[in-house]
Every structure is written in structure tokens, then in C-alpha cells.
Image (tube, rainbow, N blue to C red):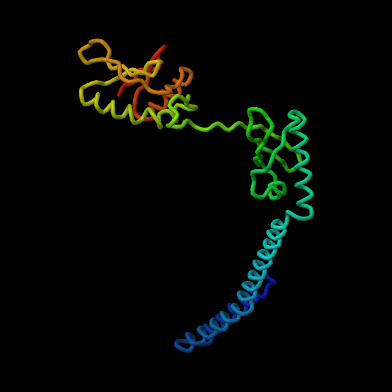
């Protein structure tokens, strides 16, 4: 706070008046005089300092809001004028980039508002045609105008209605097939004193009898994950509270 400000000057005057009242008056008169002085000073503070500051802050907020509204209005009309010119330019660059490798390629935007994407940059997706083995491409546009296209192949997750389809992830296989079968089987085995079972490479389940007799083979899982996925499957089983020991041609599961 600067000593030359009106507020500082008013405080100095207030202090002087209070000292004078305390020196000249006593008792009830001093109390009444102090109340009147502080009331007058408070009203002066409100009307000369706080109220103008509040009005100034409200004006500033209104200007900020108006500026934001103008920017949003400008972005909403980006499909015309310069926005349309930039969109055509980027479309041409994407077509050139794709057809330099795939002459028969053509494409379309999957974005609802590609002009907004072009204005702000980032990564957007396009649907491509005439490019073998690929369905989409991710277009990355940086602030310096650099453009990069990365082809994307979309593979659907395993469908329960297609049991012969190899799962793309052990977690998917476990959620769609393994969980319901293993949970019911483990609950039954635990009730009969068993503590482990074996998952074979062909997806079959073997139970070792408690008396040490020959293993009992149960029904096989459909689309059991290949051996390359077994370490990840073991982690999935461990996350479910089981112990999984990956061996050469089988997985030993215990609980």
C-alpha cells in the first residue's frame, strides 16, 4: 500500500481523530463520538474505495466474457473464409500423402468438425478406402503445420458367439470364457479337498485326485490362449487370487 493513497491518508486522519477524542472526551460521550467517527469512515471507505473496485472488477469480467464469446463465435464460423481454405489445403496434403504409396486410396473424415481440429491441431482419425489391410488412419497436425499419417487396422475383440476365434488378449479370454468355468470348478474342488488343477496346451482341464490316482480330464476350453500368451494369463489368474505356475506344456493353477 502506498502512503500517498487516499486510503492511507484516511487511516492517518482516523487515527488522529481517535486520539483527539480519547484526549478530550470521557465516558459515554467518548464512546458515542468513536462510534460516529468509525461509522462515517466506514461509509466513506465503502463509497470511495470498495464500491469503485467492485464496479471495476465487474467491468473487467464483462470484457473478458465478451472477448471469449467473440473467440467462440469466430471458431463457430471457421467453416467459412480462412477455415475453409485451410481445410482444403490439409485435405489435399492428406490425399497426396496417401496416394504417394497407395495410388487408389481415397478417404473421408470421421470427425464431426474437421475445421476445428485443423485450427487447434492434435490427432484426428479418417476412414480410408483402397488401402489393403487398413481401415483408418490417424492424422497428426502440429502447431508448425507438420502433418503425419499413421495407418490403423481395427480388430474387434473376441465374440463369445465365435468360440473358434483366437482371443486377442488373455484378459478378454478369461472374462468371456475362463472366469465362469474356473470359478464354478474351483468352488466344487475346494469343497472336496482339492487345491489345484492343470490347464493343458490344448485347453483341457485335468484334476489330480486327492488319493494320488490318475489325473481326471475335464472338458476343454474353446480358443484357449496360445503358449506365447501364458505369462500374461498367469498374471491375470494371480490378480484373481490364484497361483499360476507356467510350465512347458501346461499351467498349474492352485488356490
Q: Which of 122 and 66 is in front in this view?
A: 122
Seen in the picture, residue 3 relative to 186 is either above or below; the reply is below
Q: Residue at x 76, y 32 (%)?
A: 99
Q: Where is residue 109 in the image (x, y as percent from the top left)?
A: 67, 43
Q: Where is residue 230 in the image (x, y as percent from the top left)?
A: 44, 20
Q: Residue at x 70, y 34 (%)?
A: 149
Seen in the picture, residue 151 relative to 115 is either above or below; the reply is above
Seen in the picture, residue 54 relative to 38 is either above or below; the reply is above
Q: Which of 113 and 219 is in front in this view?
A: 219
Q: Where is residue 9 in the image (x, y as percent from the top left)?
A: 65, 76
Whether residue 33 sits left or right of residue 221 in the image: it is: right
- Quadrant containing the C terminus is top left
Q: Which residue is drawn at 70% across and 60% down?
A: 73
Q: Nearer the viewer, residue 58 or 251?
A: 251
Q: Nearer the viewer, residue 53 or 200?
A: 200
Seen in the picture, residue 176 relative to 110 is either above or below; the reply is above
Whether residue 137 sits left or right of residue 194 in the image: it is: right
Q: Which of the 4 quarters of the picture holds residue 129?
A: top right
Q: Which of the 4 quarters of the picture holds residue 152?
A: top right
Callout count: 0
> For the view shown, which residue lies furthest in the bottom direction?
29
- Quadrant containing the N terminus is bottom right
Q: Position of residue 98 (x, y in %)?
A: 74, 33
Amino acid at each position: 500500500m502506498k502512503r500517498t493513497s487516499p486510503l492511507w491518508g484516511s487511516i492517518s486522519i482516523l487515527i488522529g481523530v481517535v486520539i483527539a477524542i480519547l484526549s478530550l472526551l470521557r465516558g459515554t460521550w467518548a464512546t458515542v463520538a468513536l462510534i460516529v467517527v468509525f461509522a462515517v469512515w466506514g461509509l466513506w471507505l465503502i463509497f470511495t474505495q470498495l464500491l469503485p473496485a467492485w464496479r471495476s472488477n465487474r467491468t473487467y469480467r464483462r470484457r473478458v466474457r465478451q472477448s471469449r464469446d467473440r473467440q467462440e463465435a469466430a471458431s463457430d464460423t471457421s467453416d467459412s473464409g480462412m477455415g475453409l481454405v485451410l481445410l482444403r489445403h490439409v485435405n489435399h496434403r492428406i490425399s497426396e500423402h496417401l496416394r504417394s504409396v497407395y495410388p487408389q486410396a481415397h478417404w473421408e473424415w470421421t470427425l464431426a468438425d474437421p475445421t476445428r481440429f485443423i485450427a487447434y491441431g492434435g490427432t484426428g482419425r479418417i476412414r480410408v478406402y483402397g488401402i489393403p489391410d487398413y481401415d483408418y488412419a490417424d492424422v497428426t497436425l502440429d502447431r508448425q503445420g507438420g502433418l503425419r499419417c499413421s495407418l490403423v487396422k481395427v480388430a474387434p475383440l473376441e465374440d463369445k458367439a465365435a468360440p473358434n476365434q483366437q482371443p486377442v488378449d488373455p484378459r478378454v479370454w478369461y472374462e468371456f470364457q475362463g472366469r465362469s468355468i474356473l470359478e464354478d470348478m474351483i468352488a466344487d474342488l475346494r469343497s472336496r479337498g482339492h487345491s489345484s488343477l492343470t490347464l493343458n496346451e490344448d485347453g483341457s482341464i485335468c484334476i489330480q485326485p486327492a488319493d494320488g490316482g490318475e489325473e481326471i480330464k475335464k472338458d476343454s476350453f474353446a480358443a484357449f490362449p496360445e503358449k506365447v500368451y501364458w505369462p500374461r494369463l498367469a498374471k491375470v489368474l494371480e490378480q484373481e487370487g490364484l497361483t499360476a505356475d507356467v510350465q512347458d506344456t501346461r499351467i498349474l493353477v492352485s488356490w
